[in-house]
C-alpha cells in the first residue's frame, strides 16, 4: 500500500491538501494543522456522495447500508435487517455498555475496597441463559419465513411476505416466465435461456471499451454481454458451475446462490424496475474471482421479446443491438 515510501492514506490526503506542492514539504505545527484540515477535506469528500446516491443496482461511494431493493425478497431482507436485526444489535450493545459502566464505576478498587466472595447467582445465570435464547427465537421466526420465501419457487398462487415480514404473505408473485441457467466458470458466467436453448458468455468488459461508453459503467462491474430479462416477470435462476465453486449474487434482487459443480441450485427474482443491476461472484474461486461480475439488464416486455427474437435468429451481438442505449434506460 505504499508508493515511494509514502502510505496510500498520506498520498490520498496530500491529493486533497489545500497546500501548493512546494509547501507540502514544510514541517512543523503549521503543516500539521494544514494536514489535519486536509484529512477533514478528504473525509468530507469521501462521505459527501452519501447525500447524493449514484444509482441503484450498484454500490455508491461512502454508502452505508444496503443497495436499494427492487424485488419482494430484497424488500423482506431490508425490513428484517433494518427493522429487527439492527435494533436488536444496537440495544444489546447499549445494554452491555451500560453494564460495563456500572462495573467500572461501582466495583473499582476505590469505591468497592472489600469485594464480595460469592461466585454463583442462580437468578442471574438463568437470565443470561434464557434471554439470549428468547432473542434468538424471536429473530429466527421472521428469518425462517424470509428464507422459505427465497427457497420457494413462485407458482402464481403462493403469497410472499415482501416488506411485511410479520404477515402470512400478501404479495402476489407470478409463476416463472423465464428460466435462465447460470454456469460459473473460471472466470466468467454463462447464461442459458433454457426454454429457447440459447446461451452466451458474459465476461468483464475491457477498460478501453468501458471508458468509451456513455454512461460509463462502474469499474469491475461492467460486462460485455448482460443477462437480459423482462420487468415484472418472475425469472427462475438455475445455478451451477463448470469447474470450482462460485456463487451468483445480485444485492438489489436479494439473491445469492452457490454455484457448485455437479449440482443445480435454484433461486428466483422478480424485478419491479427496469435498469441495470450489478452483482459479483461471492465465493472465492481463484485468482480472477474479483473479475467475474454479474450485470442484469431489466427491460420492458416488448424490448425483451425483440431482444430474444433477434437472439434466436442470430447472435448475441444481434440481440444486444436491439436494446436501447444504456443512456436511454430509465434511471438505472
Ligand atoms: Cu468467484
Image (cartoon, rainbow, N blue to C red):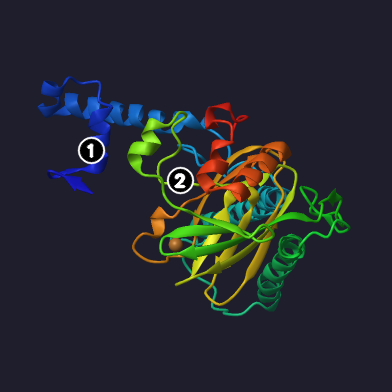
Label 1 SS: helix
* Spot occupied by residue 306 in the image (x, y as percentages of width and height): 66, 40
Sequence order check: which comes first, mark 1 or mark 2?
1
Depicted 217 relative to depicted 173: above or below: above
Residue indicated by mark 2? 224
Q: What separation in Å lies between label 1 and label 2 (alpha carbons)?
A: 36 Å
Q: Does the CB distance between marks 1 and 2 fall below 8 Å?
A: no
Label 2 SS: loop
In the image, taking residue 12 as reference, residue 260 lies left or right, namely: right
Depicted 130 relative to depicted 24: above or below: below
Nearest the eye: 12 or 330: 330
Quadrant for ligand 1? bottom left
Q: Which of label 1 and label 2 is nearer to you? A: 2
- Residues packed near mark 1 inside 10 Å, few (<14), some (14 to 19) or many (20 plus): some
* Spot occupied by residue 111 in the image (x, y as percentages of width and height): 49, 58
Q: Is label 1's Cβ within 8 Å of ligand 1? A: no
Q: Which mark is residue 36?
A: none
Whether residue 292 is visible here, answered yes or no, is: yes
* Spot occupied by residue 198 in the image (x, y as percentages of width and height): 60, 57
In the image, taking residue 107 as reference, residue 68 lies left or right, namely: right
Locate residue 326: give its quadrant. top right
Whether residue 99 is visible here, answered yes or no, is: no
* Spot occupied by residue 128 in the image (x, y as percentages of width and height): 66, 71
Q: Which mark is residue 10?
A: 1
The residue depicted at 54 percent of the width and 73 percent of the height is 116
Q: Residue furthest front?
A: 313
- Residues packed near mark 2 inside 10 Å, few (<14), some (14 to 19) or many (20 plus): some
The residue depicted at 41 percent of the width and 64 percent of the height is 186
Amino acid at each position: 500500500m505504499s508508493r515511494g515510501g509514502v502510505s496510500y492514506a498520506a498520498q490520498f490526503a496530500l491529493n486533497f491538501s489545500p497546500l501548493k506542492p512546494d509547501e507540502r514539504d514544510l514541517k512543523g505545527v503549521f503543516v500539521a494543522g494544514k494536514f489535519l484540515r486536509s484529512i477533514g477535506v478528504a473525509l468530507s469528500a469521501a462521505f459527501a456522495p452519501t447525500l447524493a446516491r449514484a444509482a441503484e443496482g450498484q454500490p455508491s461511494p461512502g454508502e452505508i447500508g444496503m443497495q436499494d431493493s427492487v424485488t419482494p425478497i430484497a424488500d423482506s431482507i431490508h425490513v428484517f435487517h433494518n427493522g429487527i436485526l439492527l435494533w436488536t444489535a444496537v440495544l444489546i450493545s447499549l445494554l452491555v455498555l451500560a453494564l460495563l459502566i456500572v462495573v467500572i464505576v461501582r466495583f473499582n478498587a476505590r469505591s468497592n475496597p472489600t469485594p464480595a466472595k460469592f461466585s454463583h447467582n442462580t437468578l442471574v445465570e438463568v437470565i443470561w441463559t434464557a434471554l439470549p435464547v428468547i432473542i434468538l427465537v424471536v429473530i429466527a421466526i421472521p428469518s425462517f419465513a424470509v428464507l422459505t420465501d427465497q427457497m420457494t419457487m413462485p407458482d402464481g398462487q403462493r403469497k410472499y411476505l415482501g416488506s411485511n415480514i410479520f404477515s402470512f404473505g400478501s404479495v402476489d408473485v407470478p409463476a416463472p416466465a423465464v428460466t435462465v441457467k447460470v454456469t460459473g466458470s473460471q472466470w466468467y458466467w454463462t447464461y442459458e435461456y433454457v426454454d429457447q436453448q440459447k446461451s452466451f458468455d458474459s465476461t468483464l468488459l475491457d477498460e478501453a471499451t468501458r471508458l468509451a461508453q456513455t454512461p460509463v459503467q462502474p469499474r469491475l462491474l461492467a460486462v460485455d454481454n448482460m443477462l437480459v430479462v423482462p420487468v415484472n416477470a418472475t425469472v427462475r435462476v438455475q445455478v451451477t458451475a463448470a469447474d470450482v465453486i462460485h456463487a451468483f449474487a445480485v444485492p438489489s434482487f436479494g439473491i445469492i446462490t452457490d454455484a457448485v459443480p455437479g449440482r443445480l441450485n435454484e433461486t428466483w427474482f422478480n424485478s419491479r424496475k427496469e435498469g441495470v443491476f450489478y452483482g459479483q461472484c461471492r465465493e472465492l474461486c481463484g485468482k480472477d474471482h474479483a473479475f467475474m461480475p454479474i450485470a442484469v439488464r431489466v427491460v420492458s416486455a416488448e424490448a425483451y421479446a425483440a431482444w430474444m427474437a433477434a437472439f434466436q435468429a442470430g447472435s448475441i451481438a444481434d440481440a444486444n443491438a436491439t436494446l436501447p442505449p444504456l443512456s436511454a434506460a430509465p434511471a438505472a
